Every structure is written in structure tokens, then in C-alpha cells.
């Protein structure tokens, strides 16, 4: 072989080597685990691409691997929107490098949240939604210290919210909306070890009063709507907060709003269907609202004129004790 041919040969053999390597990037342990998961879910149609002949990292549906730091281990698993029946397979716990687990829109997925998820110490993102999962919000989640995002909304979870979740110091988003959770919001949530800018617990059967200490936190979004919460919620407000949205609608909250000062950042405020008293503070005309609703409470007095408060029609104000002024009828 002359020099050029040698080079050419070398070039093509490396090319061949890299392409054949590229086909087998997936770590064999992860591949075996995923094939067990597929089998355990009765080989559903949405997992057809999980073919043992192909590389799981590059050609399987819903799989991502990390090339840079962990040498092609599976770091993300997404199973969503197909005809999948059964329970979350225990083998999901055997993907030790998994960072993101998303299982959603599977109406025939039943059973409890798989306890082996507790083994996934690297998990940062957990999204299990729109399934028929039952049982509790597992206590073991608090052992997954890297969790930044938990969304278990739209399931059939029961029981109370584990107070231990407050120890998750990296958690920035917690959504447990649209389940059948009971009990109260844990006292521990007032001393969350991290910032918890998003807390969404709507459409459950939570009861009792909310911990005073929640006032120490600065939420971005709070949604406690459609529960059976009662008592004071004024501590959630304050001039120095950076809250954008507060939805407390359809509860049994009972407090006086006359002295409640809103953060400049607040753009959505929904308090409808509670037992809230007092009159609307003039300070509220300083806010720029996208959504404003104080209907179905026991408010009284003149609606302050100015700012955004007259941008909303009477349906934002109706069914109160004696509110008056635009957009309602004139005060007597
Ligand atoms: C759920 O299961 C029922 C009964 O086996 C079946 O008729 C239905 O098509 C399934 N739906 C989905 C989305 O898998
Ligand atoms: C998590 O990731 C680290 C490295 O990023 C790795 O050493 C460890 O084995 C992984 N898995 C578990 C379960 O800790
Ligand atoms: C749960 O299953 C019931 C039928 O048992 C079905 O009507 C409902 O849509 C399912 N829920 C979800 C969120 O898929
Ligand atoms: C949480 O899950 C619900 C239901 O799938 C979804 O509507 C919502 O956008 C999710 N939240 C985030 C921030 O992803
Ligand atoms: C989940 O809740 C829905 C709506 O309340 C209900 O139709 C369904 O039967 C429940 N599923 C299970 C498995 O309990
Ligand atoms: C709000 O911040 C200002 C300036 O930092 C401070 O003087 C004031 O005491 C704070 N108010 C509350 C209610 O924390
Ligand atoms: C305010 O809430 C009431 C009661 O749910 C509803 O009828 C009304 O349409 C809402 N108004 C706005 C502007 O959202």
C-alpha cells in the first residue's frame, strides 16, 4: 500500500470504528434494565423503538444519555401519552444515573408510586402526572436530596403531605394539585430548607389553617385553590415579597384584608369563594393585575378608584357583603 492508500484505509477504518461504536453507546446494564421495563409494561406500542439491536441512547423513544460526564449512562426516561397498562415497573430504580423521570398521560397506569424510585439518588426532576396512581405521596422523596422539581399533579394520591419534603434544600417547584390529599399543610413548610418559589396544592381536600411560618418564605407562585383551608392567610402577602401569583380561591379562609399590602410584583390575585372580610386597601391600586377576583366573600366599603381595579367587571367583585363603587353600583 502506498502512503495515500494507507491513509485512506486508516480514515475509513476509523470512520467504521466510530460509527459502529456510535451504535453501541448505551451502557449494557441500562439497556438490560430498559428492556425489563418494556417487558414489565407488556411491550406497549409506544416503546416499539426500544429494539435491542439499536443503541438506546440515540434511537430509543424517550431516552437520553449523558455523554460528557457519565459515559453514556441513561439520565432521562420519558414515557407518556400511550396505551400503557399496569404499574410503574420496579426496574426504574435500577437506572443509577437517572436525573429525570417523566411518566405522564397514561390513564391505565395504576398502583402506588414505585418504592424503588428511592434508589435514584441522582434524580433532580420527577414528573408523574395524569395517571391513575394511588396511595400516598411517598415519604422517601425526602431522601432524594437532589430533587429540584416534583410534579405529581392529576393523579389519585391520598393521605397527607409528608412534612419531610421541607428538607429538600434544592427543591424549587412542588406541585401536588388535583389529587385527593387530606390533612393540613405541614408546619415544616414554613422553614423549607431551600427557596421554594412554586407551591401548588390546588384541588385537594387539604384542611386546617396554614402555618404562620409560611409568611417567612417568598413565593413566586402560590396556588392553594379548591381545598378546605381556613383561618388567616394574610401572612402570604407583604410589600417586600416578589410574589407574582396568589390563588386562594374556593377555601374557607377568614381574615381581614383592610391592612394587607400587596407586593409590587403581584399580577394575579384570586380570592373568590372564601370568608374574607374588611375593605379593599387603596394601596391595591398600585398593582398591575392580569387577574383579579375577590367575589363571593364578605367584603365591605368603597372599591378604591384607580390603577387596574376598574379594568375588571362586576364579576370580580360580586357576592360580597357591601362593596360599592365602580364597577359595582355607586356607594350610598
Ligand atoms: C385502558 O384500559 C381499557 C380496558 O382494558 C381499554 O379499553 C382502554 O383502551 C385503555 N386505555 C388506554 C389509554 O390505554
Ligand atoms: C449518581 O451520580 C454519580 C456521579 O455523577 C455516581 O457516582 C453515582 O453512582 C450515581 N448514582 C447513585 C445512585 O448515586
Ligand atoms: C383513571 O381511570 C378512570 C377509569 O377507571 C378514567 O375514567 C380516568 O380518566 C383515569 N384518569 C386519568 C387521569 O387518566
Ligand atoms: C405539572 O403537571 C401538570 C399536569 O401535567 C402540568 O399542567 C403543569 O404544567 C406541570 N407544571 C410544570 C411547571 O411543568
Ligand atoms: C381516580 O379518580 C378518578 C376521578 O375521581 C376516578 O374516576 C378513578 O376511578 C380513580 N381511579 C382509581 C384507580 O382509583
Ligand atoms: C421591607 O424592606 C424594608 C427595606 O429593606 C425594611 O425597612 C422593612 O422593614 C421591610 N418590611 C417588612 C414588613 O419586612
Ligand atoms: C371570579 O370568580 C367568580 C366565582 O368563581 C366567577 O363567577 C367570575 O367569573 C370570576 N371573574 C373573573 C373575572 O375571573
Image (cartoon, rainbow, N blue to C red):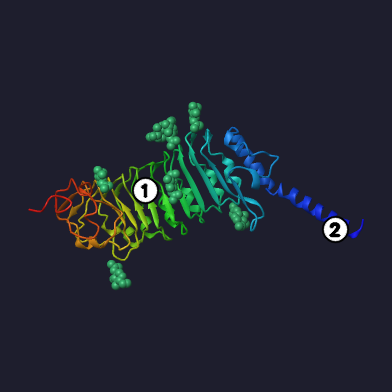
The quarter holding residue 51 reads top right
Q: In x, y percent, where is residue 252?
A: 25, 47
Toward the right, the furthest residue is 1
Mark number for residue 38?
A: none
Of the numbered discs 1 and 2, the one sitting upstream in the chain is 2
Q: Residue furthest front?
A: 4
**Quarter location, residue 172:** bottom left
Q: Nearer the viewer, mark 1 or mark 2?
A: 2
Among the 4 quarters of the image, the one containing residue 167: bottom left
Left or right, 281 with reference to 265: left
* Residue shown at the point (92%, 58%) measured from the top left: 2
Is residue 305 among the parts visible in the rendering?
yes
Which secondary structure lies at badge 1? Answer: loop
Secondary structure category for the residue under label 2: helix
Q: Residues within 10 Å of mark 2 (few under 14, many from 20)?
A: few
According to the picture, the residue beneath numbered tag 1 turns out to be 201
Q: Nearer the viewer, residue 89 or 167?
A: 89
Left or right of 27, for residue 41: left
> Where in the figure is residue 103, as x and y percent of width and height?
51, 42
Q: Which residue is mark 2?
A: 7
For disc 1, the neighbor class at 10 Å (few under 14, some 14 to 19, many from 20) is: many
Is residue 96 found left or right of 184 in the rendered image? right
Residue with the most extreme left position: 332
Instruction: Give the alpha-carbon distance from disc 1 to disc 2, as whole Å.
Output: 65 Å
Image region (quadrant) for ligand 2: bottom right
Q: Would you place residue 242 above or below residue 156 in this image?
A: below
Answer yes or no: do the residues labelled 1 and 2 have beta carbons within 8 Å? no
Cβ at disc 2 under 8 Å from ligand 2:
no
Amino acid at each position: 500500500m502506498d502512503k495515500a492508500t494507507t491513509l485512506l484505509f486508516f480514515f475509513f477504518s476509523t470512520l467504521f470504528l466510530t460509527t459502529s461504536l456510535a451504535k453501541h453507546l448505551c451502557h449494557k446494564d441500562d439497556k438490560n434494565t430498559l428492556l425489563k421495563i418494556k417487558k414489565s409494561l407488556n411491550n406497549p406500542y409506544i416503546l416499539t423503538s426500544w429494539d435491542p439491536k439499536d443503541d438506546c441512547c440515540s434511537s430509543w423513544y424517550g431516552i437520553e444519555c449523558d455523554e460528557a460526564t457519565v459515559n453514556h449512562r441513561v439520565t432521562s426516561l420519558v414515557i407518556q401519552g400511550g396505551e400503557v397498562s399496569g404499574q410503574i415497573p420496579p426496574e426504574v430504580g435500577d437506572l443509577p444515573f437517572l436525573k429525570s423521570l417523566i411518566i405522564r398521560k397514561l390513564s391505565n397506569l395504576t398502583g402506588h408510586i414505585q418504592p424503588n424510585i428511592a434508589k435514584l439518588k441522582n434524580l433532580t426532576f420527577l414528573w408523574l402526572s395524569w395517571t391513575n396512581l394511588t396511595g400516598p405521596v411517598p415519604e422517601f422523596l425526602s431522601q432524594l436530596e437532589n430533587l429540584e422539581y416534583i410534579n405529581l399533579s392529576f393523579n389519585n394520591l391520598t393521605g397527607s403531605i409528608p412534612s419531610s419534603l421541607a428538607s429538600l434544600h434544592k427543591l424549587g417547584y412542588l406541585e401536588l394539585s388535583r389529587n385527593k390529599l387530606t390533612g393540613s399543610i405541614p408546619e415544616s413548610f414554613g422553614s423549607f430548607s431551600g427557596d421554594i418559589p412554586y407551591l401548588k396544592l390546588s384541588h385537594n381536600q387539604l384542611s386546617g389553617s396554614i402555618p404562620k411560618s409560611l409568611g417567612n418564605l417568598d413565593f413566586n407562585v402560590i396556588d392553594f385553590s379548591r381545598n378546605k383551608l381556613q383561618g388567616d392567610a394574610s401572612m402570604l402577602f407583604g410589600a417586600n415579597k416578589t410574589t407574582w401569583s396568589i390563588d386562594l380561591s374556593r377555601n374557607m379562609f377568614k381574615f381581614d384584608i383592610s391592612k394587607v399590602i400587596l407586593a409590587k410584583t403581584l399580577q394575579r390575585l384570586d380570592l373568590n369563594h372564601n370568608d374574607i372580610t374588611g375593605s379593599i386597601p387603596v394601596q391595591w391600586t398600585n398593582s398591575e393585575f392580569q387577574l383579579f377576583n375577590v367575589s363571593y366573600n364578605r367584603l365591605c366599603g368603597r372599591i378604591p378608584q384607580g390603577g387596574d381595579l376598574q379594568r375588571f367587571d362586576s364579576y370580580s367583585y360580586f357576592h360580597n357583603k357591601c362593596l360599592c363603587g365602580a364597577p359595582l353600583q355607586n356607594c350610598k
